[in-house]
Image (cartoon, grey):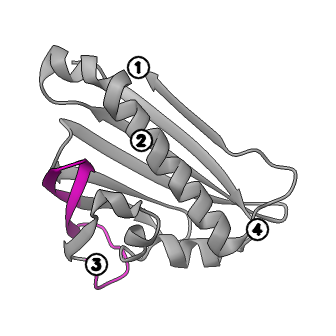
Amino acid sequence: MQLYQLKAVQYLPMSKKEAWDFLSSPANLKVITPEHMGFNILDGADRKMFPGQIIQYIVSPFAGIKTKWVTEITHVKEGSYFVDEQRFGPYALWHHKHFIREIDGGVAMEDVIDYKLPFGIIGQMMHPILVKRQLKKIFAYRENKLEELFGKMKNTTNELNLRSI
């Protein structure tokens, strides 16, 4: 089964504390997820993130297909990073690391997602056609939404890289 990786870095003109406060609140995930995905948090978003926290969602990754997605926050280093892992959902594997680091004039927010698709060779064939394209759209939406909320950092270029590993 093929392993894929998405890396995204976004630069924002805000303090590390502001970035952490926003990102460590599970309820804000709905704010930065495209509306067409029908993202709805069912349980677990009533508290700031902590290791062992289980968060349940309903999401429609593709038109007309709704699925339950359950993630666990497995690691948290206050103010610096957290990790969420899928326990149940649309991927065969989903391991998502979120890093926040201070830079001149703001923060760099970095996401590293390692994931596998279900359905063997059929899932691999669907990756470039559907999944890769959808993930790019989701991260483009997120980038735009965060810039709308917090501003755009001058003289920086956000990065997005999807690859097979």
- Amino acid identity at mark 1: Ile
Element assignment for label 2: helix
Residue placed at 17% from the left, 50% from the top?
64
Residue placed at 42% from the left, 34% from the top?
133
* 3D distance between C-alphas at marks 3 and 1: 32 Å
* 3D distance between C-alphas at marks 2 and 4: 24 Å
User: Which mark identifies residue 165?
Assistant: 1
Element assignment for label 3: loop
* 3D distance between C-alphas at marks 1 and 2: 17 Å
Q: Nearer the viewer, residue 158 or 128?
A: 128
Q: Nearer the viewer, residue 68 or 24?
A: 68
Looking at the figure, which quarter contains the C terminus? top left
- Amino acid identity at mark 2: Leu
Neighbours of disc 1 within 10 Å: few (<14), some (14-19), many (20+):
few
Res 127 → quadrant: top left
Instruction: Check if mark 3's residue and mark 1's residue have beta carbons within 8 Å.
Output: no
Q: Give the residue at mark 2.
A: 135
Does the segment drawn in magenta span residue 57? yes
Q: Give the residue at mark 3.
A: 45
* 3D distance between C-alphas at marks 4 and 1: 32 Å
Q: Is residue 131 left or right of residue 43?
A: right
